[in-house]
Image: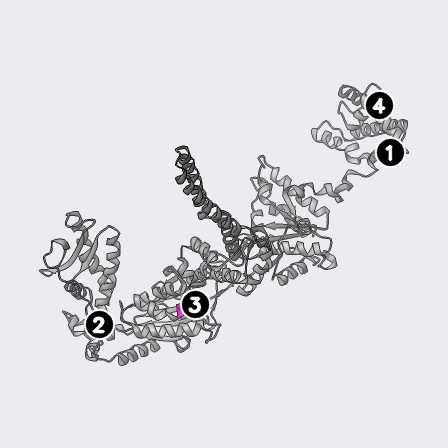
Amino acid sequence: MFSDAEHLSISTGSKGVIMPEHLLMCIVTRETYSANRVIRNICDELPNSNFEDLRRDVAEAVRASSNNYDSLSDGSDSDEDEMNQQGLSDRGMSGIPGLTGFGGGNKVKDSKKGKNSRKTLDQYGKNLTDRAKNGKIDPVIGREEEINRVMQILARRTKNNPCLVGEPGVGKTAIAEGLALKIAEGDVPEIIKNKIVYSIDMGSMVAGSKYRGDFEERIKNVLDEASSDENVILFIDEIHTLIGAGGGEGSLDAANIMKPMLTKNELQIIGATTLDEYSKVIEKDSALERRFQKVMINEPSTADAILILKGLRLKYEEHHKIKIPDEAIEQAVILSSRYLSDRFLPDKAIDLIDEAAAKKRINFAVSGEEKSLNNKLEELGKLKKAAADEMEFEKAQGFREQEIAIQNRLEELKKASKPDESGFTGTLTVDDIADVLAKWSGIPVAKITESDASKLKNLEEELKKRVIGQDEAVTAISKAIRRSRLGLKDPKKPSGSFIFLGTTGVGKTELAKALAEVMFGDENALVRIDMSEYMEKHDVSKLIGSPPGYVGYEEGGQLTEKIRRHPYSVVLFDEIEKAHPEIFNSMLQILDDGRMTDGKGRLVDFKNTIIIMTSNIGARMLTGEAGRKIGFDLADTSDKDEASRERLYGGKTYDDAKKVVIDELKKTFSPEFVNRVDEIIFFRMLGRDSILKIVDLLTANVSKRVNELGISIKLTDEAKLFLARKGYDPQYGARPLKRVIQAMVEDRFSEAMLDGVIGPGKEALVDVKDDEIVILDASKVEAPPTPVTAN
């Protein structure tokens, strides 16, 4: 047939170029071809079809194609390609009147409005509207305002392309699905009623595009199909990936292919991306940015997140066959907000509910007890058979009775694990939520499940375990935290704001760490800002982030970024007197309104933070006289009498010393700053009794580490007093104690181990001999002194 078609092409002036007309002419003129008989039979069966008319029409088409070739041909390949695209392939079946009965008289290109025109869309995307109609999309709760805003933008005449911008997990994709649900339900304005939302998978479009131009061809086909149907809306998640996608040397990327269509309003797109990617990628391409309308998707509040989870509850109950009560949902939101601060609602709470329910269902399916009983049952069967073979029937009967008891217990377990009348196999509890959260965060379950009431009630007791000799400070901060947490203070302000005053080494930073651990379950929930790094006026940009156009704009502020990711934190501004005064002006909005605006214009919420500022203002005035006393003696500085305390403050009483320091603070800082702080707390200088307690605390930590080596350790009273004398000075507080214990106890302990004096299974005795700390084997000491608590 092709040989005949080539001869026909040459004879008609087409110079051997075979076109569809030539092949069809060979078929209708050669009766030996089986295709000729098929076409004759079809013509006989179809109304208004005649084989002879068809043959004449095909001959006319051949003459027409020959004329086209003569007018186009100049010997180049491009002309030949262009001519090949004419004839039947360009005019369609309607180009030959005799073929109208075969194809219905419709041109191929007209089928773009039919199902076939969405072949590429169906290949690289998902029809969200169809999925919504088929019930394959979860309900979208609490996002009415955002969905309405998207519909308003879609209804615009120009620039009708919304771009959803928000943190990961806040529900950007859910808004596109919510729009599809509304379209499926018909709950949309007339202008959007017949729209179809397609979610495009950029990963599958890029995958397999081995050769240059493959990706561009795919994206062009998708855009052409979408632009040819005015009812198609494309949803592109992670739209920032379009920038540079498919772009190579000498070729356009996906974003530049799309821009002309967006400009001419031939295409409607809903994009979604994160705040960071929007600022890094989209904002830099102003030509692309102006074609989209930015829609901010903020993290829902705790109350809204609870409503969202309640709306999704039915789907998760049906999947897991586990009943999810309101209490579990509420605690999932509250606990995830508190302990998973690097993620966002509602995504983290949904994940928590999902995994906790999955774990519950698996535990119901096969319990540890059921496995153990099945193994025991199998073992009893073997024993019973062996006893019967040995004719020991009484023993076999005993095994049989044990089997019956185990089988009865297994039946009970099976009944307990079977779904009840409602179809549920169990109920999700707060402990199930806490158990999963503990595995995620590494925080013990007991701390997660501990209620705020019990934390607040025991706050002073817990803080005093770590902070020695500062009962007034602990009591003051505990009262302020209780007032805040129980709702008795302005809800717009932080949970508490304090200035800690006092000499170095008295426990200011330690109290901040202890507060972070007690209130937020982790000592790492402390955001520490060293104010000595902010001595210049322009350093305020370090806190809140650089303004647009400056280096570091994309990185955000050292303070604001940490609080955005860890909203439940203790914020410690250490040694505030060293920072530039301009820094404190920027902190006024934190102390007054519990918020701060970062360099990108975003509001950062400080309402769940505890603000602590430490300062050594006035410390030299207090320690001046005590510091000049060479040979400081602990015996002169008991915490229990006023005369001893006055020696610590250079002859001043505690109240006088406090007044001197606070007056110095008010001279240094502006009234508007000092007036916004909840409480100014003055820390006492440490006396003999406090120092000895701190020695006990620090040596207890050493003892824990030594116990892990299989060695117990005991300190004599003389050793504790010796360490206290060596490690304390009123100018430096208790901080040198750690260094003294490291040098005199830990170093010498390691030497004693290497020398074989002590080892695993032995008890070490730390004593004083010839004004030196010595490590002894307690079993070889004739009359080891009994350790006593120093008073």
Q: Which residue is mark 1?
A: 97
Taking 469 as reference, is 231 above or below it?
A: above
In front of the other: label 4 or label 1? 4
Q: Which contiguous range is marked in magenta? A: 450-456
Residue 453 falls inside the magenta stretch: yes
The earlier-in-sequence mark between 3 and 2 is: 3
Q: Which residue is mark 3?
A: 452
The amino acid beneath tag 3 is: Asp
The CA distance from mark 1 to mark 2 is 111 Å
Camera-near label (1 vs 3) is 3
In the rendered structure, find residue 687 and report the number of the disc placed on it: 2
Badge 2 amino acid: Gly
**Picture layout, residue 640 above or below residue 201:** below
At 67% from the left and 44% from the top, the residue drawn is: 121
Q: Earlier in the sequence, mark 4 or mark 3?
A: 4
Tell me if label 4 and label 1 are in contact, CB under 8 Å. no
Q: Is residue 242 above or below residue 48?
A: below
Position of 140 with respect to 331 (left or right) is right
Q: Nearer the viewer, residue 715 or 85?
A: 715
Q: Secondary structure at mark 3?
A: helix
Pointers 3 and 2 in contact (CB under 8 A)?
Answer: no
In percent of width and height, residue 321 lies at 56, 52
Q: Is residue 758 magenta?
A: no
